[in-house]
Amino acid sequence: MQGARIRLEDVEHYYEQQQGRTVQALMKTSLAVEPGEFVAIVGPSGCGKTTLLNLVGGLLEPSEGEILIDSRPPRAGAPDLGYLFARDCLLGWRTAARNVGLPLEIRGIGRTEREKRVAAILALVGLKDFGHAHPAELSQGMRQRVALARMLVSEPTTLLMDEPFSALDAQTRLLMHLHFLSIWERLKSTVLLITHDLGEAITLADRVIVFSRSPGRIKGEYPIDLPRPRRVADLQANAHYHDLFRKIWEILEEELVGATDRI
Amino acid sequence: MTHEGQTSANLMAHEKMAAKTRGRSRHAPRQRSRTAFVRSAVRDRTLVIAGWVAVLGVVGGAWQFAAVHGLIDPVFTGIPTRIAGAFLKSIAGPPFTVDTVATVTAALTGAAIASFLGIACAFALAQSDIWRRIFDPYFTVLNGLPRVALAPLFLLWFGIGPMSKITLAASITFFVMFYNTMAGVDSVDRDHLLLAKALGASRLQVFLKFVVPSAIPSIFAGLQLGFVYGMLGTVASEMLAGQAGLGVLLTRQAALFQMDEYFATLMLLALATTAISGLLEVLRRRLLQWQRAHIVRV
């Protein structure tokens, strides 16, 4: 386990509420993600998956335990960390290109260098001709690709993705899977993906971790031994894909059924 | 074809198709009858302009008829044809070149000073919840005070020159700008702030790149409103006492029963305010073009 990119040791997290009450969001969790590994975390909504991601991203401090990224505690805004949210979070007053350049701007990278890197990354996500467009002029899928480009532009070695495709319609989501896989298979960055879509998790990841309902803890881990490069369309005809889906779904379903009691 | 090439080809095809569908759904019903559509748009516009003329004709005509035939007393109401004559004379003479200029200059100066101070105060107080809470009750009470009540005070302090009316205008515009800017600051998207944190933006960067741009639409709405209130303050001050200005003219003309001239001055006042507001609107549209794409699409 030496040399893990992301390592969590006995991490717990509580949220403080009014009158000094606390709510446990994350039970004692240990996890190691190897460099270049693609790990997906699935679980019912409100199970603490986002809390886990925010802890790894340094947006939250763990109440207990230790988190290390390349043997250092995480720091929000570290250039080797890329973040992608469910909502694209694009700034409406900036063009697509200037939205993509925002992380570089914040890090004080000069304009010429910035424009060069933005142009390259926009081409990578297939938006070469849309740099001048404002977010309001783009479709949902295009907007999320701008957000993807904004995450990739600072060339992070670790990608933290919080249900990044959940706001898209089914068809656009499949195309984003296809597109993201082709980019990732080239970059080979370490990915921690949070999702409630098991199909998405199996399609994309090397390993799927199932979270229990709140307070969250790891309920099971499943290596996804589907060959790469994966082709999203072919997976539907792949019997092993469906075996994996069925096996993990059985575990996940118990949690989902439990969770509906609370709705 | 490589896997990768296929991927982007698929994606491109999808985008193209999506763009086509979007385009079609927006234009299809119009394309079928494009000329009919254009024709009906032109017809609507002609109808609206004709409506404007008709409303003016009916109201002006009734007024003219009533005044000429003694249904109303022209000593108090003036006569529309004579008002039009007085208006043309006003435009050519000192009521425009001296008084309108004096009033608009004072209102713009007051509004500009107040806007600067109001925006600055709002941005400063937005930095600290404590300071904001300390000043909040004072601002609320001062904003509740009808500022026209301060006109005699400012006349005592600054005399009948432009200074007193500029101060009165500024005292009204300040709060409009302050509250509008504050609302703009509060309207910053929580998700944007999370992004700023994830990107490691400094406090100053968060302010300049996220908070200020978020507040711009609200600030612009404030500027337009603030100028109109600035005119109100200026004219109110002039009516009480002043050397030049449309307010001074109005008081004098009413006192001398020069009703035709009085209504002509009112027209000057309304037109001057509308003209400046129109300029601000053009500026706003230029600056906030990124919002309009949204409006068009929805």
Image (cartoon, rainbow, N blue to C red):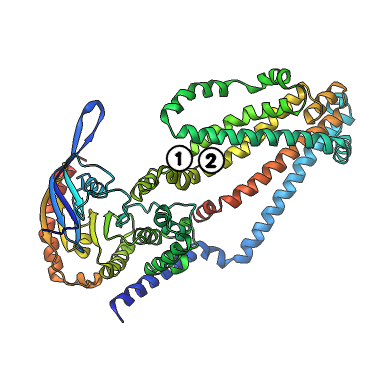
Q: Which residue in the structure is indicated by mark 1?
A: B187
The residue sitting at 63% across, 66% down in the picture is B35
* In this picture, residue A144 sits left or right of residue A224: right
Query: Which of the two residues, A56 or A260, is positioned nearer the viewer here?
Result: A56
- Asked whether the beta carbons under mark 2 and mark 1 sit within 8 Å of each other, the answer is yes
Q: Residues within 10 Å of mark 2 (few under 14, many from 20)?
A: some
Gap in angstroms between the C-alphas marked 2 and 1: 9 Å
Q: From this viewpoint, is residue B72 visible? A: no
Q: Residues within 10 Å of mark 1 (few under 14, many from 20)?
A: few
The image shows residue B182 at horizontal and vertical percentages of 50, 35
Helix, strand, or loop for circle 1? loop
Pick whichever of labels 2 and 1 is earlier in the sequence. Answer: 1
Q: Which residue in the structure is indicated by mark 2?
A: B218
Residue B203 drawn above or below residue A236? above
Q: From this viewpoint, is residue A122 visible? A: yes
Q: Amino acid at mark 1?
A: Ser
